[in-house]
Image (cartoon, helix red, strand yellow):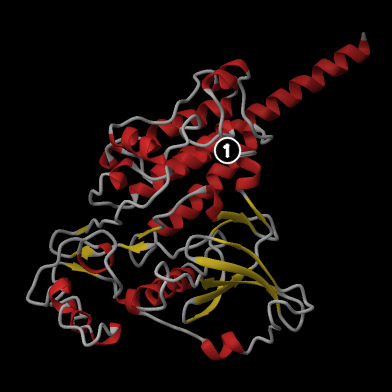
């Protein structure tokens, strides 16, 4: 269900096989372009449309709770409880709301922009999928809690603060001369905090990639998708681009898909080349997050033209890592080493998020030992000075 993303069959998944109608052919027979009379979507059984690459059963689930959604006692957004518009992404406006007992929630609703965002099959499917992923991952403390969805809106828990504000300060840009002359990260995070933050992100992504009902690809990993909960837990947010991977039972493997390439400079090189994709695109983009923690800068921080960045990435170029970071501290050296694995050009040679998680768990433990030893040594030196 849902429009294809990158020119391939059914919501971005690979080529269709079988006797079902071709989507382009079917669309020519639409009655007045009515989304709900498209015969292509009558074959929504994975037998005629996708006899090889099948969806997990739960991917068909839909649990809108419109009655609860509209009966939560929210005043108008301009009401006296502090309900207000706070920001927007490409697809959705975001509002902070308070209910009748003062609990805070976040409402995300489709941005109504002529020609760009229509209320239709695609937008409804995007919201359904966002809510579905939150529902399936509701047991994870690292995934934002969803409280319901209806139409083109979802209701989620309110989170305390964004991670990005601590990682990349300013505009994240600099010249190579500025970096050479003033070496060091452009943020105030300690090396240990960077390791811990990177581990939290890896653990959240591992919950998606290791989902027991099938691999879920976030497909839009960036710093702004991670926020801190009120208890300080790092949480992953925003699953409107998520891809629930199809599975080939005969071959015993997941089917790759396409997403149309996207925009910006934060994606994996195989996305810019419009090649078949898997969960390794999340690992590459996770590496971009790690780079921000390490340096306080955006990837390719000297370039403003995303098209230039995309061309370089398709050739295998990666963001510049100053070798001095590998000597600055144990934690920063491990983060630089992690980037080598995250940014492998061939996704089949790229580390998995589970390998990244294990790498970071060991690094966090070892860094804690080093910091404790340094603390002990400093204390002993201070005691010796006092005796003298």
Up-down relation of residue 114 to residue 355 (above or below): below
Up-down relation of residue 90 to residue 66 (above or below): above
- In the picture as drawn, the residue positioned furthest to the left comes out as 19
Which residue is at 39% across, 42% downward?
284
* Occupied quadrant, residue 103: bottom right
- In the picture as drawn, the residue positioned furthest to the front comes out as 114
Q: Nearer the viewer, residue 133 or 25?
A: 25
User: Can residue 5 be seen from the camera position used here?
Assistant: yes
In the visual, does 277 lie left or right of 86?
A: left
* Occupied quadrant, residue 364: top right
Quadrant of the snapshot with the N terminus = bottom left
Up-down relation of residue 214 to residue 123 (above or below): above
Q: How many marks?
A: 1
Which residue is at 79% across, 78% downward?
80
Q: Position of residue 334 (x, y in %)?
A: 51, 29
Q: Nearer the viewer, residue 156 or 338?
A: 156
Which class describes the residues within 10 Å of circle 1: few (<14), some (14-19), or many (20+)? many
- In the picture as drawn, the residue positioned furthest to the right comes out as 387
Which residue is at 54% across, 18% downward?
324
Q: Position of residue 245 (x, y in %)?
A: 29, 62
User: Can residue 354 be seen from the camera position used here?
Assistant: no
Query: What residue does disc 1 label?
Result: 195
Q: Nearer the viewer, residue 46 or 4?
A: 4
Q: Position of residue 320 (x, y in %)?
A: 45, 26
Tag 1, which secondary structure?
helix
Q: Position of residue 163 (x, y in %)?
A: 62, 49
Up-down relation of residue 98 to residue 298 (above or below): below
Quadrant of the snapshot with the C terminus = top right
């Amino acid at each position: 269900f849902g429009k294809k993303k990158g020119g391939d069959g059914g919501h971005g998944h690979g080529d269709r096989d079988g006797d079902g109608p071709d989507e382009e052919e079917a669309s020519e027979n639409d009655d007045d372009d009515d989304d709900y009379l498209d015969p292509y979507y009558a074959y929504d059984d994975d037998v005629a449309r996708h006899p090889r690459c099948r969806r997990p059963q739960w991917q068909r689930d839909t649990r809108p709770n419109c009655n609860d959604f509209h009966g939560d006692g929210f005043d108008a957004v301009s009401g006296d409880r502090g309900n207000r518009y706070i920001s927007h992404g490409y697809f959705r406006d975001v509002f902070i709301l308070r209910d009748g007992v003062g609990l805070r929630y976040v409402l995300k609703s489709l941005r109504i922009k002529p020609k760009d965002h229509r209320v239709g099959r695609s937008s409804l499917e995007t919201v359904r999928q966002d809510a579905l992923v939150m529902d399936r991952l509701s047991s994870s403390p690292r995934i934002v809690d969803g409280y319901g969805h209806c139409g083109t809106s979802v209701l989620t828990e309110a989170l305390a603060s964004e991670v990005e504000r601590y990682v990349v300060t300013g505009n994240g840009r600099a010249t190579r001369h500025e970096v050479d002359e003033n070496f060091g990260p452009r943020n105030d995070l300690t090396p240990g905090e960077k390791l811990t933050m990177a581990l939290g992100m890896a653990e959240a992504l591992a919950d998606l990639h290791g989902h027991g009902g099938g691999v879920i690809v976030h497909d839009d990993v960036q710093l702004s998708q991670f926020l801190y909960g009120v208890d300080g837990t790092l949480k992953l947010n925003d699953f409107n681009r998520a891809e629930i991977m199809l599975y080939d039972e005969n071959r015993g493997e997941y089917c790759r898909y396409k997403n149309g390439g996207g925009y910006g400079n934060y994606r994996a090189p195989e996305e810019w080349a419009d090649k078949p994709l898997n969960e390794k695109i999340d690992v590459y983009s996770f590496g971009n997050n790690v780079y921000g923690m390490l340096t306080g800068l955006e990837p390719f921080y000297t370039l403003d033209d995303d098209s230039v960045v995309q061309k370089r990435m398709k050739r295998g170029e990666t963001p510049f890592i100053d070798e001095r970071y590998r000597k600055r501290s144990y934690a920063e050296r491990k983060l630089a080493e992690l980037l080598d694995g995250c940014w492998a050009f061939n996704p089949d040679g790229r580390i998995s998020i589970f390998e990244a998680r294990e790498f970071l768990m060991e690094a966090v433990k070892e860094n804690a030992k080093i910091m404790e030893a340094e603390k002990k040594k400093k204390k002993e030196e201070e005691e010796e000075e006092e005796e003298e």
